[in-house]
Image (cartoon, rainbow, N blue to C red):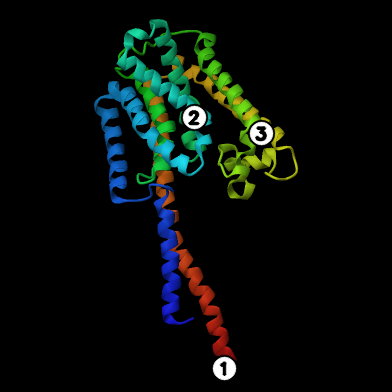
Amino acid sequence: MSYVDGLRAARAVVAKQERALEASPVLGFNKVKFFLGVTKSYFTVFILGHAPHRFPAWHALQFALLLPMQIYRWGRMKGLAYFLEFCWCANALISFYIAALYLSPDSVDPEIRARGARLLFAFGCGPLGMSVVLLGNALVPHSIDHMMSLLIHLQPAITAFCVRWRAVDASLFPIEAVGFVDYAAPPLAFLGAWAVCHALFFAAVGVGLPDRGFETTYHYNLASHGGDNAFAAVLGKLGDGSSELARFLKYELLSVLSNAGVIALTFVPFTYGTEALHFAILLATACASAWNGAGWYQHKITKSSKEIDRLIASGAAPAAKSKKDS
């Protein structure tokens, strides 16, 4: 390999890693997008600290503005089935409900408002907030996918905190002490209705979507890292000869039961928790996302040098052999 050939090979490695750093297929990296991502993060922290009573409206506004962009991207990427997952459906319910409260408060019955506040807390403090840690959500400001993941997981958790403990309009989000059944029934009813619709769709169409070039969360979870993960360990790997529909139904049952359990557990912090403890958990969750983001950048940056080191090692061996033979 000549000197120029080596430079070309190294340049190809660098170009490959630059593409990886873009993070988001369709609407990839650019300076404006990075600026907007960082600015949005600053503004979110500012509202939480300075005007927490406005945070529910800020959450709903972000979802309304950014959802069309994600629809466009996932439409191009054949990933629209991602929107059928519980996190997206729960966020749509929360965001549209908050928008209805602010735009037309008289149209929402006071009793519905109290149930809505509890449902928002159960989802935000429960499965959505916990997903930040369980799914390894990362603060990567220039990545649309990473920032949208935080929008649908971390920000509902912040909204739940503000509704429960901060000076959010009590007439819109009344906090009332209720029994466990009254607390858990609405979010569990929504989870059950979602599960039925989700399972019927996948049984009829969704299981076969990858064969038509479309992506789904189910197939991503079972196929990521070559199927070598917790999902595959429990349910088996894709294409191992088992019935894919049976595997999906087991996957669905595990998902629904785990979400239901977490939702039920949020009754404890809602009824007996304290603001300080809730804030500590929220802060730890936010720090986890920042740590994951730092790890993402470290991995992508150091991978470039590792790829070049590998290239040098692969090119050095023939050169050494040639010298020995001479």
Question: Of helix, strand and loop, which one carries label 1?
Answer: loop
Residue 222, quarter of picture: top right
Circle nearer the N terminus (3, 1): 3
Q: Amino acid at mark 1?
A: Ser
Left/right of residue 50 with respect to residue 134 in the rendered view: left
- Residue 65 horizontal/vertical position (percent): 34, 32
Q: Alpha-carbon neighbours of circle 2 within 10 Å: few (<14), some, or many (≥20)?
A: some
Q: Amino acid at mark 3?
A: Phe
Mark 1 sits on what residue? 326
Q: Check the image and report above or below for 110 versus 10.
A: above
- Residue 281 horizontal/vertical position (percent): 42, 30
Q: Quadrant of the C terminus?
A: bottom right
Seen from this angle, which residue lies furthest left? 50
Tell me the CA gap for discs 3 and 2: 18 Å
Mark 2 sits on what residue? 87
Residue 246, quarter of picture: top right
Question: Of helix, strand and loop, which one carries label 3?
Answer: helix
Left/right of residue 47 with respect to residue 82 in the rendered view: left
Circle nearer the N terminus (1, 2): 2
Left/right of residue 118 with respect to residue 51 in the rendered view: right
Tell me the CA gap for discs 3 and 1: 61 Å
Mark 3 sits on what residue? 248
Q: Amino acid at mark 2?
A: Cys
Residue 202, quarter of picture: top right
Residue sitting nearer the eye, 321 or 29: 29
Q: Nearer the viewer, mark 3 or mark 1?
A: 3
